[in-house]
Amino acid sequence: MINQGTLDATDVVVTDYYPTSTTLSTADTNGWIDAGTSGTLSIANVPTGTTTTVQIALTIDPNFSGTEIYNNAEITQANNTEGLEDQDDPIVNQDGSSDDQSQSPTDNDVDDEFPGTE
């Protein structure tokens, strides 16, 4: 996760939209709160221009028969000293699915290193 803005982000909430055929692993020790088809993680502060690594442990359904799994996560809440709103477009509203691999015209991807991102 990268704070591309001009203000420090505080009280940040990251939402991970679990891919189909996955669940939050009982072995996850990263602080995620499970909500069934998604999970949230709170981060106290992400200073301007810094990168924060966020990890999650998911369990793949033993009946999964595919060859690839795409995982999407995004910042869904953040505060700052100016009280300004986060400018990202929600992934879940872009292409109809948290598993969607199609191109999405948002700034949710920085370096275009993953399939299905611009």
Image (cartoon, rainbow, N blue to C red):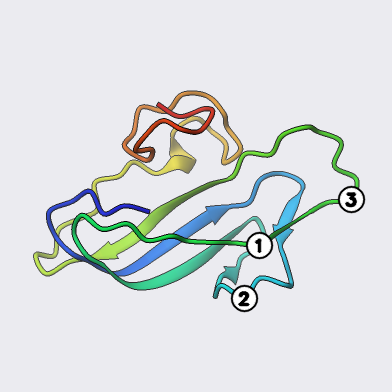
**Viewport quadrant of the C terminus:** top left
Q: Which residue is mark 3?
A: 62
Q: Amino acid at mark 2?
A: Thr
Q: Identify the image quadrant of the N terminus.
A: bottom left
As shown in the figure, which amino acid type bears the numbered disc 1? Ala
The reply, left or right, for residue 84 in relation to residue 20 is left
Label whose residue precedes the other's in the sequence (1 or 3): 1
Q: Secondary structure at mark 2?
A: loop
Which numbered marker is on residue 57? Answer: 1
Does the CB distance between marks 2 and 1 fall below 8 Å? yes
Q: Label 1: few (<14), some or many (≥20) within 10 Å?
A: some
Q: Does 42 sit above or below residue 99?
A: below
Q: Residue at x 26, y 54 (%)?
A: 3
In the image, 31 versus 113, the foreground residue is 113
Cα distance between the residues tagged 2 and 1: 8 Å
Q: Is residue 10 above or below residue 110?
A: below
Q: Quadrant of residue 79?
A: bottom left
